[in-house]
Image: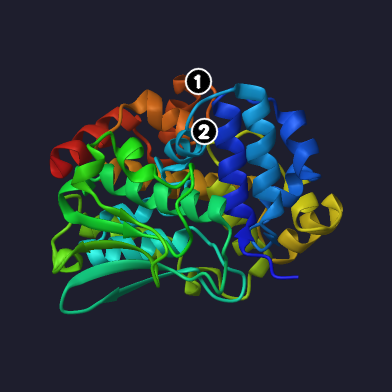
Amino acid sequence: MHRPISAQFLFRAYRACQLLGARRPILLRAMELEEPALRNPLTYFDSTKLSALIAASAEELNISNLIFKIAEKMVPSGFSDPGFLAMFRANLGIVLRNITRSQRLGEDRPVFDLSRDRLGDYVVWDDAVCSSRQIKTLGIAVIIASLRTIELDPSLDIRSVSFTHSKSEEVGFVASFMNCDSASIPIFYDRPHNRIEFRRGFFDLSNPGSNERLRLTSNAQRSQKRWRNRPYAKSCYDYLIYLLDKPGPNLDSAAETFAMAERTLRRKLVSERTSFREILETVRRDVCQLYFLEGKRPLSDISTLLGYSELSAFTRAYTGWYGNPPSKDASAHAKMAA
């Protein structure tokens, strides 16, 4: 069976539905899944799981334009979210390529691609990989909303949106989602391609939110060389980054996600001369560095995003890492990022 939805994408949609007010047990029961399955970044599901999630949320919440509300909550907003690092790349073509790849849609090959011709630049959806209208609508909506977070107005650069299927009530979404006049962005149906058409040269434009130091730092942190011959430590590192600002990242849940006993994972980490706690501290230090390089958030927000229950706990941890309180370094980085 072809499974086009990554666990990461489905988990983000599941979390978005909870933030909108849907109850966790009802959503899990509708999908016939447990949370550990959603936490495994290597797992893929068929499109019926997303359909069941949306149907259960619609019954729970009675919200108009639900799929667009879910998309808004799925937009990457921190360094634990897939795709957020894309917001700091040098030009908009690279930003879009990384945003589309971070959706992790398509088990064998991605459903999104970028293309261009003499008329325009395009983000294209491949129906041969996934033809689900709900996934298509949600995935494209997340991409458009993500562009808005880097201080762009997509309505000024998107020339049209086209779909291969016939017009239906859930797909006239661009105008309502972006709060703009529907006449300003034509939406076409029964076309040869599913695609967002941007004006020619859009991919070459500089990204106003580019941050080269942050990009280089994140690349060094996540390089394979850093974790050579330590596959279990690397798996735990990736697992913890993704769940750092969400409840539940502990050794037991990690072992369950990796389909092994807790003592087995502990023993594997010991053989690699580390521990789950040490990896968690490494993740927190690394992600803290990225937030400081971003230079836009108060320490209280950074503390929460790093998984600390109180700012005082973050202050103690940071002082133990570097010998001085975080306020001293955060202010210096904020001036550099201004």
Vertical relation: 192 (above or below) 317: below
Percent across and percent down for residue 94 are 28, 66
Whether residue 279 is visible to the viewer of this picture, yes or no, is no
Circle 1/circle 2 CB separation < 8 Å = no
Near-viewer residue (72 or 128): 128
Q: Quadrant of residue 93?
A: bottom left
Q: Is residue 246 above or below residue 61?
A: below
Name the amino acid type tagged 2: Leu
Residue shown at the point (50%, 56%) measured from the top left:
136
Of residues 142 and 208, the one nearer the viewer is 142
The answer to whether residue 61 is seen in the rendering is: yes
The image quarter containing residue 291 is: top left
Q: Residues within 10 Å of mark 2 (few under 14, many from 20)?
A: some
**Image coords of residue 86 (percent x, y):** 34, 57
Q: Residue at x 21, y 41 (%)?
A: 333
Q: Residues within 10 Å of mark 1 (few under 14, many from 20)?
A: few
Q: Which residue is mark 1?
A: 310
Quadrant, the N terminus: bottom right
Task: Give residue 34's position: percent from left, percent from top.
Answer: 79, 43
Q: Residue 80 got which mark? A: none
Location of the C terminus by quadrant is top left
- Per the rendering, the mark at residue 66 is 2
